[in-house]
Every structure is written in structure tokens, then in C-alpha cells.
Amino acid sequence: MKKVIRNGKVAVLYSPGYGAGWYSWESIPEIVFDSRIIEKVEAGKQTEITDEFMKSLGYTGYWGGAEDLEIEWIPEGMSFEIEEYDGNESIHIIGKRDYLVA
């Protein structure tokens, strides 16, 4: 999978609208980085991100959050997580720190 990287930052897709999530509904890491989907979002063509389009890329699932997709530019090497509440996704940057895990 090819990531989109510009000026040391990686494009990450997420869906901040309420309803269906993008990553949170299917949890496929590749869909937040896929350059072919990012290209559609950058062109404002979210309506073209249909089930058929996603199947042509090799993804199966429910893609209802596509209409709300946005791009967050995250510095390369930073850890992050996509949090979701009622379909509304947000990005939480963890950073390059070590964390304790129970």
C-alpha cells in the first residue's frame, strides 16, 4: 500500500461526521492510508467512494462514512489512534513516547 507523504507528514483518512465511521466500523488499517482513496478526497469526490469502488480496490465492508471523509496530516513516525463516538471519529496523536501498558 502506498501512503501519501508530503513535507514529512502522512495523509490519514478519518470521518468526523456522526453516523457511520470510516476506520472504526471496519478496522482495516490500510483504508486510512490508501493513496487511491486520498486522491478522491483531495479532489472533493467523496461521492465516488462507493461499495463498487472499494471492492475494485480489494476492500469489502460497509463504507457509509465515506461522504464525511477528511484528511489529517500527521508527522511521519508518530503513533496515533482513531477514536469514535456515535460514528464521529477523531484522531488522537500519541507521539513518540513510551507508554506503560497494563
Image: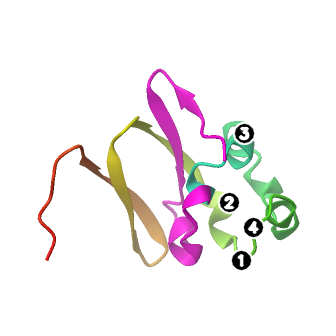
Say if mark 4 contacts mark 1, CB within 8 Å: yes
* Image position, residue 57 (x, y; %): 81, 58
Q: Amino acid at mark 3?
A: Glu
Residue wearing tag 2:
67
Q: Is residue 21 depicted above or below 71 in this figure?
A: below
Residue wearing tag 1:
61
* Image position, residue 44 (x, y; %): 72, 42
Q: Can residue 20 be seen by looking at this rendering?
A: no
The numbered dot on residue 59 is: 4
Q: Can residue 26 be seen by looking at this rendering?
A: yes
> Where does the C terminus fall, quadrant-wise?
bottom left
Say if mark 2 contacts mark 3, CB within 8 Å: no
How far apart, in angstroms, are the residues tagged by discs 4 and 2? 17 Å
Residue wearing tag 3:
39
Of badges 4 and 2, nearer the viewer stands: 4
Q: Amino acid at mark 2?
A: Glu
